Amino acid sequence: MKKIDIACIIDDDPIFIFGIKKIMELIGFSKSFMIFHNGKEALNNLKAIVSQEEKLPDVILLDLNMPILDGWQFLEEFIKVPCKKKIIIYIVSSSVDPEDVLRAESYQEVSDYIVKPVSVQKLKEILNDIQKAG
Amino acid sequence: MIQDKSHMDQGTESLKQNYLKKELYTLIKKDDLIFDFVQEAGLDGLWFWDLNNPENEWMNAKFWTTLGYNPNEMPHTSSAWQDIINKDDLKLVYQNFAKHCKDPSHPYDQVVRYTHKHGHTIWIQCRGLVLRDDKGKPRRMIGAHTDITKLKEVELQLQRQVNRYHHVIEGTNLGTWEWNVQTGETIFNERWAEIIGYKLSELEPISINTWVENSNPDDLKKSNQVLQKHFEGKTSFYEFEARMKHKNGDWIWVLDRGKVVSWDTNGNPEWMIGSHQEITKKKKDYERNRLFIEQAPSAIAMFDNSMCYLAASQEWFNVFKIDKQEIVGKSYYEISPKIATKWEINHKKCLSGKIIKNNAERIQNDNGSVQWLSWEFRPWYTNDNKVGGIIIHTSDITKIKREQELKSLLEVAEKQNKRLKNFAHIVSHNLKSHSGNFEMLLDLFAQENPEMQDNEIIQLFKTASDHLSKTIVHLNEVVLMNTSVKDNLTELNLRQAANKAIESVLAIAIENEVIINNNIDPKLNVLGVSAYLDSILLNFITNGIKYSTTKRNSYVTLSADLQDDYVVVNIEDNGLGIDLKRHRSKLFGMYKTFHNNKDARGIGLFITKNQVEAIGGKIEVYSTVDQGTTFKIYLKYEKN
């Protein structure tokens, strides 16, 4: 069983962040969190971490609908960044548009597409999957 | 003049009756002056001939002056005039002279030509009388000349005119007729007969019946009416186009024209003169035009120059709402008085050779309805390049006008629809985020505060949150419904799709004790979108289970059959049924439920109907309350 070190949440919705963080803490999802409020902020910071060879997150929960740089734009940029570490990326969105689902599937870097809301139960399953895969 | 005996006898008789004549005759015998006057003033020449010595002939002065010669220079010999008389006429003179000598009753009277001294011809009527001795032998001859040159010239001129008239008739190929209205006596020229393929001799005896027997009976009736008008003085001449039977059996057309030229003392027409002109080709051309116009798919009518119909298309009747009737020959003003009067100025302009158009004119009809017309007036020309009338071409563009309005409406609707879709997208997405948060927070709250699980407010909160989420899910389904999938349908096996749906509802079927039968032929394929077909079947089957009744053993049975281009899927249950009288119109509306079933959510049928229609199908429903419901789903059939 692999213990998740850092979980990264990229979302512009403070309630969602509050909630998901709470649930994560509740089920002991990870040791620490890294939180960004839009794609741009996340990309800049993650790039800096890569270049300074600091500790990258193990899991990224990525929202789609965000200001400045949305989830897709972040993904486009982020997969170009050379990085040795395998980061598990989940898209977590309210959108049920099949187009979004299909688009998510086209990225091999994206493990799954999770439709909000994320319940305690759902997060436990995700945690399970990650640990199994690890 | 003294011509023959009988005349002289009459003369002697009259002498007895008139004293002045008697006196004149006596005077002539006594006084030479009287005779000189008579022969100079009354005649254009006098001669007296010695037949015993034929070279001796006395001619008076007038004889020579008439011919341009000086009498004093001319000898009193017969050879003198024989040199200047026309040689052919001289032969005639000798012939008549010989006959008259032999038989006194044969008159010596002929017209001869002399050459005037200046070269021109002088026409002389020459009359003579042989005087005989006791034995009846010719001894002397007396003769008189009358200059008829002027008369002759008039006659020649007249002859030339007659010839010219003949040439005109021949040149224009006119048949002529002369008809005595009262006796029926009739004269035709050769061309008259030739028009109908005969020689004049073949038609003998000629009478007015020759015309009657060779004409079309219908036309004859009309022709008589036209004729009557002329007889009554209502028309200045008679004119009619009539059909005649040609010798070869064909009907040919003639333009028959004529005029009464003499009237009897009672004022009744007596002689009438007229002509026949063959116009078969013109008529056939016209007939072809007429047929062409009648068959034309647009509204066309052809008028003569007094705005009487020559032809009209069927569409013309439709556009101007004219009752089916024979309108050829009738006035435009009589048939459509309102619009004709409205367009009167245009008719006149057009008849003077102008082309007039209007792309859209608004016409208010008598019944208040509005019609939009586009029209064109065009003159048409006869062979001699005169305006023969006009052709009106119109289109009823009311529909097009309305379509234009509709189109702009549609554009507005399309834009609004687009905005609405956008709006729905945003609303559903945003609402979804918020309701998601609610759900998540409630979930979290429950986890953190297990003691609050039974709090009623928290419970209701949770229900409200669930309903909100579900509503948003439905809203999304509706928003995402894509009605343009019709073009890319794929082939789907119906039975397999049904099985898949049955599998997924198996749990609730068992729970509700409903048996599901799938009787669909495994070979049946339909055209559709896989996700839609699954959803459609799932919805109907779920529906059947949900509205089953506990009163009997429930079932939902699926079957399918072919109907034309459709596969009809029958989903039959024996459940609660729907009161269709009350609910049919609302059955497939959004958020309509007809039962107090706790799961009824009313969105299913709405979505399903839209999905069925999106893949080109339709739904029928048959139901009896408390007996069951059958939904018939028509889906596009894929043969191969």
Image (cartoon, coloured by chain):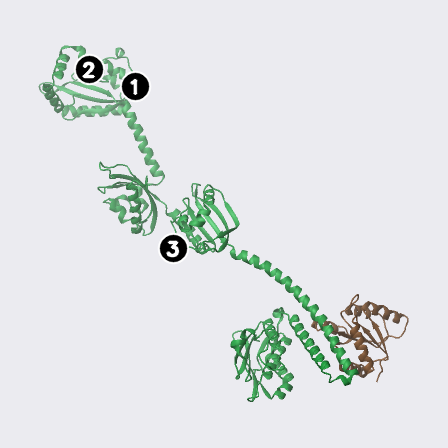
Chain colours: A brown, B green
Chain containing the residue with disc 3: B
Q: Quadrant of residue A17?
A: bottom right
In whole angstroms, how far apart are the C-alphas of marks 3 and 1?
Answer: 77 Å
Q: Quadrant of residue B609?
A: bottom right
In whole angstroms, how far apart are the C-alphas of marks 1 and 2?
Answer: 24 Å
Is residue B109 visible to the viewer in this orientation of the structure? yes
Chain containing the residue with disc 2: B
Q: Which label is found at residue B325?
A: 3
- Residue situated in front as seen by the camera: B146 or B292: B292
Q: Secondary structure at mark 3?
A: loop
In this figure, which residue is indicated by the disc labeled 2? Answer: B38
Residue B615 spot, x, y in % from top left:
60, 72
Q: Earlier in the sequence, mark 3 or mark 1?
A: 1
Residue B450 spot, x, y in % from top left:
77, 85
Q: Secondary structure at mark 2?
A: helix
In whole angstroms, how far apart are the C-alphas of marks 2 and 3?
Answer: 84 Å
Q: Secondary structure at mark 1?
A: loop
Is residue A94 visible to the viewer in this orientation of the structure? no
Tag 1 and tag 2 share a subunit: yes
Looking at the image, residue B491 lies above or below residue B351: below
Q: Earlier in the sequence, mark 1 or mark 2?
A: 2
Q: Earlier in the sequence, mark 2 or mark 3?
A: 2
CB-based contact (under 8 Å), mark 1 and mark 2: no
Between label 3 and label 1, give the one nearer the viewer: 3
- Residue situated in front as seen by the camera: B159 or B475: B475
The residue under label 3 is which amino acid type? Gln
- Image quadrant for the C terminus of chain B? bottom right
Q: Is residue B324 left or right of residue B393?
A: left
Q: Is residue A123 left or right of residue B323?
A: right
Looking at the image, residue B330 lies above or below residue B70: below
In this figure, which residue is indicated by the disc labeled 1? Answer: B116
